[in-house]
């Protein structure tokens, strides 16, 4: 029998199913932009502090050192770049986690998409990166451009302790940049009216803007690579494929520098 239009075997609907609890949502678009600016400011500030400490130390060791030459050399100093990257990394990830944590009704794991997919899926996305690098390098060669930019060679030859540079490029940078760009920033934009497509494009634009050391052609390549990373993040629903892809891309780029240096030494 039915009573008041309800089936006889009906059961009470949980409060969650009734929608009485607010839906888990990240920060809105403008809040995401504002908090992301704070993260970037802190990231740059930590690097500025490291650079300033490096400059002061150099001036103390050699009071007659030309400040202009010192400033110019620091832009391609691999040892300094590695230290600055490693120093700023924990603060960047820490703020991303903090801002995700204080947003109620959504866990940090959900916010930053810390869902581990299958290794086969990660492997497939890494193959996509290899294909992208082959196409990009092939186009660069056909356009009669340097496959390895000169500044990358300068950075590697001034690293002094190359394991630290490899750590910064292959471990720290991929984790830090992906947790922020394809994690925190991506999630807020993806959940707005712009959706996944907007998140892919905006995160790629912001990421490529950070690579100001490249020329226009290089920045364009970084942007396309950022689109690929964002697409992987959107399709997989996980931050780990972009991290793996980013790390692999940096491994290949750094290995190319080593190859070029070996060839020049012959």
Image (cartoon, rainbow, N blue to C red):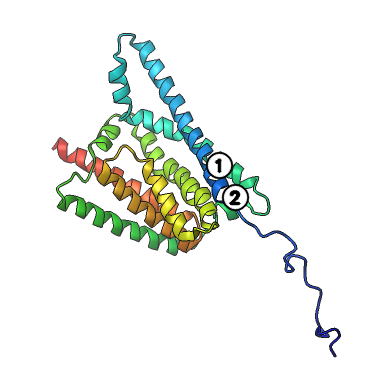
Foreground pick, 38 / 51: 38
Crowding around mark 1 (Cα neighbors within 10 Å: few <14, some 14 to 19, many 20+) is some
In this view of the protein, can residue 8 be seen by the observer? Answer: yes
Instruction: Give the quadrant of residue 17.
Output: bottom right
Question: Circle 2 is placed at which residue position?
Answer: 27
| Label disc, if present, on residue 35 of the rendered structure | 1
Q: Are marks 2 and 1 in contact (CB under 8 Å)?
A: yes
Q: Is residue 91 above or below residue 249?
A: above
Q: Which quadrant does the N terminus fall into?
A: bottom right
Q: Decide which of tag 2 and tag 1 comes sooner along the chain.
A: 2
In this view of the protein, can residue 241 be seen by the observer? Answer: no
- In the picture provided, is 9 more to the left or to the right than 85? right
Judged from this view, the residue extending furthest toward the bottom is: 1
Foreground pick, 248 / 100: 100
- In the picture provided, is 32 more to the left or to the right than 138? right
Instruction: Give the quadrant of residue 146.
Output: top left
- Residue 111 at what x, y percent from top left? 58, 53
Estimate the spatial distance between the alpha carbons at disc 2 and disc 1, rounded to whole Å: 9 Å
Q: Is residue 209 above or below residue 69?
A: below
- Residue 139 at what x, y percent from top left? 20, 54
- In the picture provided, is 238 more to the left or to the right than 23? left
């Amino acid at each position: 029998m039915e009573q008041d239009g309800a089936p006889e075997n009906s059961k009470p609907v949980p409060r969650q199913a009734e929608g009485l609890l607010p839906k888990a949502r990240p920060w809105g678009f403008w809040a995401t932009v504002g908090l992301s600016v704070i993260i970037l400011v802190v990231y740059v500030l930590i690097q500025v502090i490291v650079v300033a400490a490096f400059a002061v130390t150099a001036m103390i060791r050699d009071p007659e050192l030309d400040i202009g030459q010192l400033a110019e050399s620091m832009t391609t100093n691999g040892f300094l770049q590695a230290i600055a990257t490693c120093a700023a990394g924990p603060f960047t990830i820490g703020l991303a986690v903090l801002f995700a944590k204080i947003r109620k009704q959504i866990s940090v794991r959900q916010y930053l998409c810390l869902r581990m997919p299958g290794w086969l899926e990660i492997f497939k996305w890494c193959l996509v990166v290899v294909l992208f690098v082959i196409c990009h390098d092939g186009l660069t060669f056909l356009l009669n451009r340097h496959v390895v930019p000169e500044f990358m060679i300068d950075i590697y030859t001034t690293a002094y302790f190359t394991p630290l540079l490899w750590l910064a490029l292959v471990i720290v940078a991929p984790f830090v940049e992906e947790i922020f760009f394809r994690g925190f920033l991506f999630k807020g934009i993806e959940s707005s009216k712009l959706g996944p497509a907007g998140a892919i494009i905006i995160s790629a634009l912001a990421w490529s803007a950070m690579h100001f050391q490249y020329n226009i052609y290089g920045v364009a390549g970084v942007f396309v690579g950022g689109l690929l990373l964002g697409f992987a993040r959107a399709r997989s629903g996980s931050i780990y494929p972009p991290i793996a892809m980013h790390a692999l891309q940096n491994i290949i780029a750094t290995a190319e520098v080593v190859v070029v240096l070996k060839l020049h030494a012959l």
